[in-house]
Image (cartoon, rainbow, N blue to C red):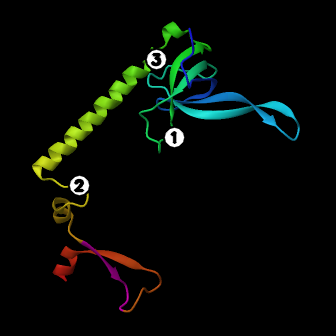
Amino acid sequence: MPTPPHTLCGVVVSAGRMMKAVKVRTTKQTYNSFLRKHYTAYQTHHVSDPASSLRTGDVVRIAPASWRSPKDNIKHVVTSILAPWGEPIEERPPIPKIEELEEKARAKREAKMERRQERKRNGKQGKDGDEQQKSLGERHTDVVGGSGVVGGEARVVIDQELKNS
């Protein structure tokens, strides 16, 4: 079976410490021009394991996850187990296909956009909206002492407390 483009093979070095995620070590050959020699360089990746089916020591194939956020630390997803360590593959939960994961992410995003549109239609605002400001009361910073900050202390006073005093 031909390997899809942009896939890497590696060994799971840490599993079971994060929910639905593992750490995979991959290798590549790098050339040192001063020594004029190739040597093995290791790189570790945080990889999404949606079914929690990987164990430490498994040899796996990973691929980049296009639907993940660039800010997210987990940028790859497991595509297959090449060589299991310990428990056989048949006794583990099956690994979902990349297409299934993309569809699930797309459906989750669409549901989020529908909820956002519903909120806009109902007139509710987000964090900076009037509804929330009225319920919490407006906040002001009152500097302790009359002129300037005394000892670096400042306190936040709610309008309702100011009106009462």
Q: Residue at x 55, y 22 (%)?
A: 5
Q: Is residue 143 left or right of residue 130?
A: right
**Can you say whether 37 is above or below 115 in the image?**
above
Q: Residue at x 57, y 24 (%)?
A: 7
In front of the other: 33 or 135: 33
Q: CA distance from mark 2 to mark 1?
A: 27 Å
Magenta-colored stretch includes residue 110: no
The mark nearer the N terminus, 3 or 2, is 3
**Can you say whether 79 is above or below 133 in the image?**
above
Q: Quadrant of the N terminus?
A: top right
- Residue 27: image location, x then y, percent: 69, 28
Q: Residues within 10 Å of mark 2 (few under 14, many from 20)?
A: few
Secondary structure under badge 2? Answer: loop
In the picture as drawn, the residue positioned furthest to the bottom comes out as 147
- Residue 64: image location, x then y, percent: 51, 30
Find residue 100 and name its label: none
Q: Kindly report the secondary structure that dominates the magenta region of the rendered protein.
A: strand
Q: The residue under label 1 is which amino acid type?
A: Asn
Q: Is residue 160 left or right of residue 154?
A: left
Find residue 126 and name its label: 2
Residue 94 picture quarter: top left
| Magenta stretch, residue numbers | 139-146
Label 1 belongs to which residue? 73
Find residue 95 and name its label: 3
In the picture as drawn, the residue positioned furthest to the left comes out as 122
Q: The residue under label 2 is which amino acid type?
A: Gly
Q: CA distance from mark 3 to mark 1?
A: 21 Å
